[in-house]
Amino acid sequence: MKTVTVNIVTPDGSVYDSEVTMVIAKTTSGEIGVLAGHIPMVAPLAIGAVKLKKAAGTTEVAAISGGFIEVRPDKISILAPSAEVAASIDIARAKEALARAEGRLQKKQDDIDFKRAELSLNRAMNRINVHEGNI
């Protein structure tokens, strides 16, 4: 089966760079699957997991916090504010972030930015789900 190079990049640098047979990502309009030779496109990504299927039949997963996917026939680039492959997620830190976000959302104060707290909650839940394989 044909492969395509995938590069996941954050402001801190490259998080993932490898050959895969298929990429499955959650865009703001729904989930997409991309194979080698796909027509060029750019799409905004939602907070979610990116599944990277390898030629050996294995699947690697990365947690991303939005961004964009750029598809070319021979290369796929994912540009995200933050991204982590499942093996590198600090689960204790993710659970602390989840507890903080839940605490902010439960407070009934006017000075709390609920949208920001909700996004923080979604990012933390995504990281925990990717780490635990619940995707």
Image: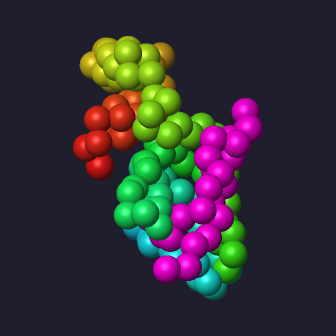
Residue at the spot 54% in from the left edge and 48% down from the top edge: 66
x, y percentage for residue 58? Answer: 38, 57
Question: Can residue 32 be seen from the camera position used here?
Answer: yes
The quarter of the displayed image where residue 127 is located: top left
Please give left or right for residue 67 compared with residue 60 in the image.
right
Depth check: give the residue in front, 126 or 101.
Answer: 126
Look at the image and give the residue range highlighted in magenta. Answer: 1-28
Please give left or right for residue 36 compared with residue 106 in the image.
right
x, y percentage for residue 99? Answer: 32, 16
Tell which residue pokes out farthest to the front in this image.
Answer: 56
Instruction: Decide whether residue 42 is among the magenta residues.
Output: no
Residue at the spot 43% in from the left edge and 48% down from the top edge: 61
Please give left or right for residue 125 compared with residue 32 in the image.
left
Depth check: give the residue in front, 109 or 125.
Answer: 125
Above-or-below relation of 49 to 93: below
The quarter of the displayed image where residue 41 is located: bottom right
Residue at the spot 36% in from the left edge and 40% down from the top edge: 130
Please give left or right for residue 19 compared with residue 13 in the image.
left
The main secondary structure of the magenta stretch is strand
Depth check: give the residue in front, 22 or 68.
Answer: 22
Residue at the spot 29% in from the left edge and 42% down from the top edge: 133
x, y percentage for residue 93? Answer: 43, 17
x, y percentage for residue 84? Answer: 53, 37
Instruction: Decide whether residue 26 is among the magenta residues.
Output: yes
Q: How is the image coloured?
A: rainbow
Question: Can residue 26 be seen from the camera position used here?
Answer: no
Q: How many marks?
A: 0
Above-or-below relation of 88 to 77: above
